Amino acid sequence: MDLVVAGTGRDFDFKKEKSTAKSWSFNDHEFQRKKRVASYKVYSLEGKVKGSFRKSFRKYATPFILILHVPLKMSRRYDSRTTIFSPEGRLYQVEYAMEAIGNAGSAIGILSKDGVVLVGEKKVTSKLLQTSTSTEKMYKIDDHIACAVAGIMSDANILINTARVQAQRYTFSYQEPMPVEQLVQSLCDTKQGYTQFGGLRPFGVSFLFAGWDKNYGFQLYMSDPSGNYGGWKAAAIGANNQAAQSMLKQDYKDDISREEAVQLALKVLSKTMDSTSLTSDKLELAELFLSSSGKVKYQVCTPDALSKMLVKYGVTQPPAEA
């Protein structure tokens, strides 16, 4: 945004950043005419006027035109639709969807040499809520693919059902499981379509996909509302994901085992969660691995087993005996 001020140096109050001089908009005909007058001095500065310039402007009694380029902090003009780019090349509606994910319960995925571990934080909004018997953060898409969710759950349910249908259609057509990356890419194409057409809003949800196929073995993918996705060795989504990501970057090893991955995920989540104490009621843990028969197995950890793990790895203290 260009703020154009015409007048003398004495007309401009730099302390209040206001002018008593007449102002013209950038496309105004009067401004275009005044700009060609030789007695007017034209100055163009990036951002706010710095202190070193203030005295020099004060001494100019001759008329001049001052052009201030002020960065647009308000996004009102560009966030009404997903199809409008801002001057900085940003899509504000997509960024707002990512902000919604930042307020949701966090989820962590870790790729190990013998499986994939997914851990999620359940947000307990009230003690009066009936605890769900099914998982809240972990979902099985097919026998060889599962995912962890962070964001608006109603949006996630739509995309999970879409992914399940696509996986079954592929199996019906080709008589073999759908490759993991092909399923992720297909779902991300759907998400991307909701950022490019008017009248639609982006899905406010991010996914961590864990899967296995005969081509690439165990894989971990992360996707966001824009439709972008990428393969990761360890990733975090949701609240405090930046802090969790930096901890994973420090402690992750390429030859990590599944048991060590569980320990690392619980350790990172315990340090990045907003809650003071970590209990099995606030967590969900799922693992994807190959069974002894060679088949892919998806296993959700029970609350009792999860409580024992938390004590075993020193994340929580064992309950005091009466």
Image (cartoon, helix red, strand yellow):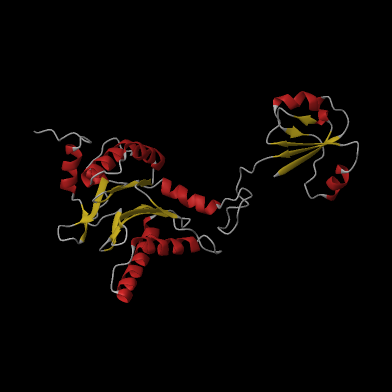
Looking at the image, residue 36 sits to the left or right of residue 185; the answer is right
> Residue 144: percent from the left, percent from the top?
27, 61
Residue 265, compared with residue 148, is above or below; it is above
Q: Residue furthest left?
A: 322
Looking at the image, residue 252 sits to the left or right of residue 201; the answer is left
Please tell me in which quadrant of the rendered image residue 47 appears: top right
Name the residue: 68% across, 40% down. Answer: 70
Residue 239, compared with residue 97, is above or below; it is above
Name the residue: 36% across, 46% down. Answer: 235
Q: Quadrant of the N terminus?
A: top right
Please tell me in which quadrant of the rendered image residue 187 appears: bottom left
Residue 229, compared with residue 45, is above or below; it is below
Viewer-closest of 233 and 11? 233
> Residue 135: percent from the left, percent from the top?
26, 55
Q: Quadrant of the C terminus?
A: top left
> Residue 7: percent from the left, percent from the top?
84, 35
> Residue 191: percent from the left, percent from the top?
45, 61
Q: Would residue 131 be visible to someone looking at this image? A: no
